[in-house]
Amino acid sequence: MPSRSKGSGAGYLQFVVENLPGKAAVRRWWKRRHRPEENTKPGEAQALFVWRDNEEHRDDIERHYLKMLANARREVIIANAYFFPGYRLLHAMRNAARRGVRVKLIVQGEPDMPIVTVGARLLYNYLVKGGVEIYEYRRRPLHGKVALMDDHWVTVGSSNLDPLSLSLNLEANLIIHDREFNQTLRDNLSAIIAGGLRAG
């Protein structure tokens, strides 16, 4: 699910990446490949750029996932290629499901590294017993790192919900408040669920 950011928010993203501490190579790569577009008409969506580093933003992405799960009222869908989060996220997913929120998790059924599936499946019983629905997608590789909540909240980015992404890697996600984008993503994820195999 490739995505592209345009408009005034894209300029802010460029500024952040160009000013990452100790990331000169990243800055050079970004400058070569990302030029700000001129005269782009702004849309109505609200977006927040969050990232994880090993300095001041170690758990920013995870905190936004936890906040989303705590605020959910009707439905949460998470699609992640590599899924092996810590206890806080697992507990938050179960708590949301026990409140009556329909929590759906889409994971890779046949990943490029089989150990990934072994790790994820260790968590299935804990989540399913708490009311979480889990779907393994097997038709083709799943590269998505996205989630949606209710009818307005979406996140899309580079971060998986695994130890590398949440504790070590430099990662970045956009959090978007927009009903139209939420519905578009929901339609895509619903199609993936329809073609997946429900676990548990």
Image: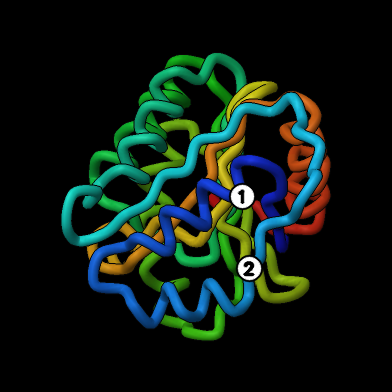
Q: Residues within 10 Å of mark 2 (few under 14, many from 20)?
A: few
Residue at (46%, 41%) from the top-left corner?
Answer: 128
| Residue at the farthest left position | 55
Amino acid type of the residue that numbered disc 1 sits on in the rendered structure:
Ala
Residue type, label 2: His
The quarter of the displayed image where residue 19 is located: bottom left
* Quarter of the image where one finds residue 71: top left
Evaluate if marks 1 and 2 touch, with contact meaning CB atoms under 8 Å apart. yes
Residue at image coords 47%, 72%: 117
Q: Quadrant of the N terminus?
A: bottom right
Residues 156 and 22: in front is 22
Residue 76 at x, y = what percent? 57, 32
Q: Could you tell me if residue 67 is visible in this image?
A: yes
Q: Earlier in the sequence, mark 1 or mark 2?
A: 1
Work out how far the residue at label 1 is from the one at label 2, CA to CA, in angstroms: 9 Å
Residue 178: x percent and y percent? 70, 27
The structure residue drawn at horizontal position 56% and vertical position 56%, both measured from the top left corner, is: 145
Mark identifier at residue 10: 1
Q: Which residue is mark 2?
A: 34
